[in-house]
Amino acid sequence: MRSKQVVAAIGWRTPSVRHWLQHNQDKMSANMARQAMPTGAMQAFVRKETERILAACTKCGKCFEACPMTRYSPKLAGADPKAVATGVLGLLNGGEGSPEALAWASVCVRSGSCVPACQDNVDPKMMVRIARMIASGGLGGTKKIPVRDDRDYYDRVRAFAKLQLTEDEIKNWM
């Protein structure tokens, strides 16, 4: 409660508060979700979504192919989209998940580019988000991926998004 009062008093747009909000986005999302619904209800929601995703996904890998972030992870270079999708579903199903699936969960920035690519109405953005929650230990399991601890991460993402580079510029500069 105290943090809400501080934010209300000084405003969320000040650099230090904005930085803190950006840096703690994943923790805040989980905390806000816990406040919005009781823990049991949230766990039931995640379980229900996981079951729906596991039943609907055909492991075609089109969501992985549509993801703009996969090219930024060396672990995903040349990865088979179907194998990555299978690894993510394995993670959701209680398995360890493949290294490529964990890498994809790590680089996801929730752009939503994967959603229209899915023809099975799975909501791959939710699928990868749940996979990330599982892999980061957010649902009580062991951590399989490190939690991002980079103060300038979100500022860099915004800066690159504002550049609106063409495909040729991206090939030359990235």
Image (spheres, rainbow, N blue to C red):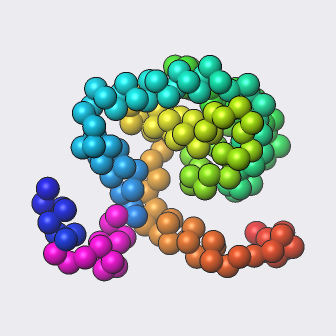
Query: Where the C terminus falls, by quadrant?
Result: bottom right
Q: Position of residue 116 (x, y in %)?
A: 71, 47
In the image, residue 50 sits, relative to residue 167, either above or below, namely: above
Q: Position of residue 72 (x, y in %)?
A: 70, 56
Q: Nearer the viewer, residue 55 or 106?
A: 55
Q: Position of residue 172 (x, y in %)?
A: 84, 74
In the image, residue 76 sits, relative to residue 140, either above or below, namely: below
The residues colored magenta run: 9-21
Residue 90 appears in the picture as rendered: no
In the image, residue 125 sits, relative to residue 24, either above or below, namely: above
Q: Is residue 136 magenta?
A: no
Instruction: Give residue 40's quadrant in the image.
Output: top left
In the displayed structure, does residue 56 sit left or right of residue 20? right
In the image, residue 54 sits, relative to residue 127, either above or below, namely: above
Q: Residue at x 73, y 25 (%)?
A: 58
In the displayed structure, does residue 30 sit left or right of residue 111? left
In the displayed structure, does residue 25 sit left or right of residue 114? left
In the displayed structure, does residue 71 sit left or right of residue 34? right
Q: Residue at x 32, y 43 (%)?
A: 33
Residue 150 appears in the picture as rendered: yes
Q: Residue at x 59, y 27 (%)?
A: 53
Q: Magenta region's main secondary structure?
A: helix
Q: Nearer the viewer, residue 111 or 147?
A: 111
Q: Position of residue 173 (x, y in %)?
A: 78, 74
Q: Residue at x 60, y 22 (%)?
A: 54
Instruction: Give residue 93's quadrant in the image.
Output: top right
Q: Residue furthest right?
A: 168
Instruction: Give residue 68's quadrant in the image.
Output: bottom right
Query: Where the N terminus falls, by quadrant?
Result: bottom left
Q: Is residue 12 magenta?
A: yes
Q: How many marks?
A: 0
